[in-house]
Image (spheres, grey):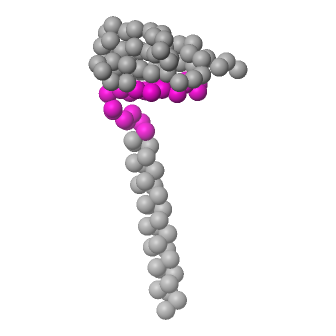
Amino acid sequence: MSSAGVLRVTGAPAGLELWRGKERLANGTAGGEYSFRGLPRGQYSLKADGKEWGVLMNGDVAMDLAGKVAPQGDWKRIIGIILILAINIGGITIIVRIWKKGN
C-alpha cells in the first residue's frame, strides 16, 4: 500500500503554487487544471492571487477552486431525495387506506 497520493485541482487561477510548510513544492504558470502526483500524506497549501487553500492529503484528493459543485453529486442527491419522498408518500397512502377500511 502506497502512502503517496494524487492531488487533482480544477478551476485553478494562473500562478498556482503548492506549498508544504514554508517550502514551495510546485509553481504553475497557466490556470485551469493541475495534477500533483506522488505527494506523501500530510498538510499542504495551495496559493494564488493572494488566496490560500488548505489541503489534507490522506490518499487521492480532488479540489475545485472555482467553487462549482460536481454535477454528478448534485444529481445523486436530488434523485435520492425524490425516491425517499415517493416511498414515504406511498407508505402514508397505504396506511390511510388501511385506516379508512377499519372504520
Residue 69 image point, x, y percent: 37, 35
**Which residue is located at x 40 percent, y 8 percent?**
27
* Figure check: 2 above or below 25: below
Residue 67: where, in percent of width, then height?
33, 32
Q: Foreground residue, 27 or 30?
A: 27
User: Which percent across, then down, holds residue 51?
Assistant: 33, 24
Tell whether position 67 is magenta.
yes
Against 99, is 47 above or below? above
Q: Is the residue 103 above or below the residue 70 in the image?
A: below
Q: Is residue 84 magenta?
A: no
Residue at position x 48%, y 11% from top? 23
- Give the quadrant of residue 15: top left
Q: In the drawing, does residue 31 fall left or right of residue 2?
A: left
Which residue lies at the image location 33% right of the left edge and 18% below the top edge? 48
Residue lying furthest bottom: 103
Q: Which residues are magenta?
A: 53-73
Q: Can residue 32 be seen at all in this image of the molecule? A: no
User: Which corner quadrant of the image does residue 2 belong to?
Assistant: top right
Quarter occupied by the N terminus:
top right
Residue sitting at 39 percent across and 33 percent down?
70
Q: Give the x, y percent position of residue 25.
A: 48, 10
Is residue 25 visible from the viewing direction of this image? yes
Query: Would you place residue 8 above or below residue 86 in this image?
Result: above
